[in-house]
Image (cartoon, helix red, strand yellow):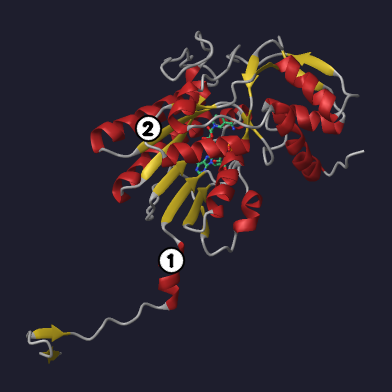
Amino acid sequence: MAKDSSNGENKTVTKPPPTPSPLRNSKFFQSNMRILVSGGAGFIGSHLVDKLMENEKNEVIVADNYFTGSKDNLRKWIGHPRFELIRHDVTEPLLIEVDQIYHLACPASPIFYKYNPVKTIKTNVIGTLNMLGLAKRVGARILLTSTSEVYGDPLEHPQTETYWGNVNPIGVRSCYDEGKRVAETLMYDYHRQHGLEIRIARIFNTYGPRMNIDDGRVVSNFIAQALRGEPLTVQAPGTQTRSFCYVSDMVDGLIRLMEGNHIGPINLGNPGEFTMMELAETVKELINPDVKITTVENTPDDPRQRKPNITRAKELLGWEPKIKLRGGLPLMEEDFRQRLGIQKK
Ligand SMILES: NC(=O)c1ccc[n+]([C@@H]2O[C@H](COP(=O)([O-])OP(=O)(O)OC[C@H]3O[C@@H](n4cnc5c(N)ncnc54)[C@H](O)[C@@H]3O)[C@@H](O)[C@H]2O)c1
């Protein structure tokens, strides 16, 4: 240690610290925000990852147990220095350092969430508790992808966020509907009790490339059936309505919600409303005019109407969907053709 008295002050001069390694330097330059996406190998999650990775300041970590998701959806990011993929089940605790958590992990299609309903409940309840515990430990902001299913078979139409819903607590869909309702409660309790920064999105039907083929969701079903030349099976009576949001619009809404100042819940979905018969006719017209449309028996507790009121999203996030159904279906058709190996005639 040397004394420097050149300017008259008796100042202690210490040896300057070693220069950080180039690796560390570049890390600090590159990654400002470390983001965890649970369920990031799934349909919406993988599109969200694509968007987050576009920003060079983001480092993205995906935790997924691959129940309904696949590494294939993330193929282009595997090996990327700002990307990490962890095989992890959210019903177990996860200890990592992150700034934001997008908590998507949960099967979304009825075929898969009814396959093991107890596991679905565990994913929604224990999984959300674990993600909230992580957020609390590291001070991260956390966004939950809840669902329009929290409105059940709604008695209010279209559904606003203030509507409390009409849900059967003991039906075959309850593991999902009630699971998500408890997940929302947990989010709010952590917010009130521990001051956690939370965001809740209530997602309405979303469609697009990378949906599981034959997963029982109506858009993927109809497109796969049309491409294979099979009859389009409309569940009775066919007059039940849904709204369909293209996945890039949904991802945009989720990022706006995470980055904005409003905790939600906020409905994200496309307010364009279609009956199942209209959807089948549109798919037939756009993809395969030769297929037949048939009616089959419906599943229990199928809601008759679903249409989001997105006033909150418009006002608070400046968000509304841009892609119309007729614009989105051909984009999904292309992806399904490739995966099914069916060329366009
Ligand atoms: N797609 C829609 O129309 C829609 C509508 C409403 C809500 N949501 C919600 O959005 C989220 C994503 O839905 P999606 O359509 O992408 O579904 P998806 O099934 O394609 O993706 C879910 C992902 O979570 C993973 N996962 C499931 N259980 C897990 C567990 N225990 N641990 C770790 N990973 C697990 C799956 O492997 C998959 O990768 C879900 O939370 C869903 O409830 C989706």
Q: Residue at x 72, y 36 (%)?
A: 213
Numbered tag placed on residue 44 in the rendering: none
Q: Which residue is mark 2?
A: 263
Residue 3, located in which quarter of the rendered image? bottom left
Which percent across, then down, holds residue 276? 71, 17
Q: Which one is in front, 7 or 231? A: 7
Beta carbon of the mark 1 residue lies under 8 A of ligand 1: no
* Left or right: where 276 falls relative to 93: right
Q: Is residue 105 visible?
A: no
Q: Report the image quarter containing ligand 1.
A: top right
Q: Nearer the viewer, residue 196 or 117?
A: 196
Above or below for 282 versus 130: above
Callouts 1 and 2 close, C-beta under 8 Å: no
Residue 307 in the image, given as x and y percentages of width and height: 57, 18
Q: Quadrant of residue 231?
A: top right
Is residue 156 shown above or below 18? Answer: above
Q: Is residue 167 left or right of residue 187?
A: right
Percent x, y of residue 171 = 52, 17
Q: Is residue 90 above or below residue 326?
A: below
Residue drawn at point x = 49 percent, y = 27 percent: 314
200 displayed left or right of 249 = left
> Which quadrant, please, contains the C terminus?
top right
The front one of 75 and 8 is: 8
Q: Earlier in the sequence, mark 1 or mark 2?
A: 1
Residue shown at the point (55%, 44%) measured from the top left: 48
The spot of residue 162 in percent (x, y) is 41, 17
Q: Which residue is mark 1?
A: 29
Q: How packed is label 1: few (under 14 Cα within 10 Å), some, or many (20 or more)?
A: few
